[in-house]
Image: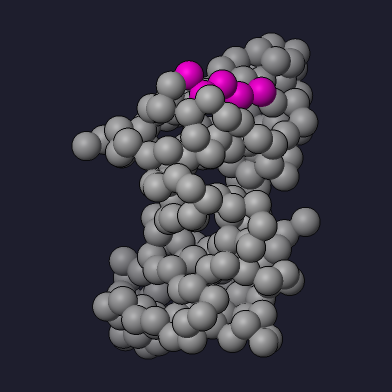
């Protein structure tokens, strides 16, 4: 079964707006990662946040992690057309190291 | 560096046929993975290899076998393909060993259709 569930499944916004995607998971984790997938391509790693971290930034990306609620959010600020893609959260479990469990993804469309 | 490469990019099989998907990485990573991605779903782990000489089952291993040929190469074999194995297959690799999970680097995928 999927460890992570993402919300919303699809999001459509205007260029320049901020996009927020959420991820919930079920079991304790070592870290949580976000990946982007452009249509027909492989996944590209965006950012990793460890279980003892609450917030992390990378360029226009901001990730938060709330381990008490078992949830994470990815914020993309000042969105661009090139941000159109699917975004996946992936959790690394405390046991079974070196395995990631992916959510179903959020399909983000940025309208010009 | 090419990163993670996969061959072939596309493949059509008939039910019962066999084939091997090839994956290679040139980043000197210890760990390699095979995932499948079905429409509207995230990736599901089929098999992984934590280090050269070891392989372990993931979430959906039935119908597949793997070989870690050397540190660079990790192949996935379908012995008798079934329509339920129609999917996009991704290979990935990650860095240091010793149980520490690092970020994964993905290949471009193989789109497999089983008729």
Quadrant assignment for the N terminus of chain B: top left
Residue A90 among those drawn in magenta: no
- Looking at the picture, tell me which residue is in the foreground, B1 or B84: B1
Q: In the figure, residue A7 lies in which quadrant?
A: bottom right
- Residue B45 coordinates in the image, percent (x, y): 63, 44
Residue placed farthest to the front in the image? B98
Q: Colour scheme of this structure image?
A: one colour
At horizontal 44% and vertical 50% (from top left) the residue drawn is: B104
Where does residue A77 sit, x and y in percent of width and height? Answer: 35, 85
* Res B82 visible: yes
Image quadrant in which you'd find residue A84: bottom left
Q: Can residue B115 be seen in this view?
A: no
**Count of marks overlaid on the render:** 0
Residue occupying the point 30% across, 38% down: B27
Quarter holding the C terminus of chain B is top right
- Look at 72% across and 34% down and name the residue there: B61
Give the side of residue B110 with respect to residue A79, left or right.
right
Q: Is residue B88 above or below residue B75?
A: below
Q: Residue furthest top?
A: B17
User: Magenta span: helix, strand or loop, mainly?
Assistant: strand
Magenta range is B65-69
B64 with respect to B70 (left or right): right
Image quadrant assignment for residue B62: top right
Q: Where is residue A2 in the image (x, y as percent from the top left)?
A: 72, 59
Up the image or down, A50 lies above or below A85; here it is below
Of the pair B107 and A83, the residue shown nearer to us: B107
Q: Which residue corresponds to the image point at 48% horizontal and 28% vertical from the top-left?
A: B52
């Amino acid at each position: 079964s999927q460890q992570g569930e993402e919300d919303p499944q699809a999001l459509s916004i205007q260029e320049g707006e901020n996009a927020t995607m959420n991820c919930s998971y079920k079991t304790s984790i070592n870290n949580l990662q976000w990946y982007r997938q452009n249509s027909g391509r492989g996944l590209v790693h965006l950012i990793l946040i460890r279980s003892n971290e609450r917030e992390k930034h990378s360029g226009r990306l901001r990730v938060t992690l709330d381990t008490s609620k078992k949830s994470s959010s990815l914020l993309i600020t000042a969105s661009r057309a090139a941000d159109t893609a699917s975004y996946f959260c992936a959790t690394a479990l405390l046991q079974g190291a070196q395995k990631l469990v992916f959510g179903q993804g959020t399909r983000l469309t940025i309208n010009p | 560096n090419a990163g993670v490469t996969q061959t072939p990019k596309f493949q059509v099989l008939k039910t019962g046929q066999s084939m091997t998907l090839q994956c290679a990485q040139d980043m000197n990573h210890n760990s390699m993975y095979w995932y499948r991605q079905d429409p509207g779903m995230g990736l599901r782990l089929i098999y992984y290899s934590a280090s050269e000489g070891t392989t372990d089952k993931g979430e959906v291993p039935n119908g597949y076998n793997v070989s870690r040929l050397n540190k660079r190469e990790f192949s996935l074999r379908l012995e008798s393909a079934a329509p339920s194995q129609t999917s996009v297959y991704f290979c990935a690799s990650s860095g240091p060993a010793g149980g520490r999970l690092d970020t994964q680097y993905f290949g471009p995928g193989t789109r497999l259709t089983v008729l």
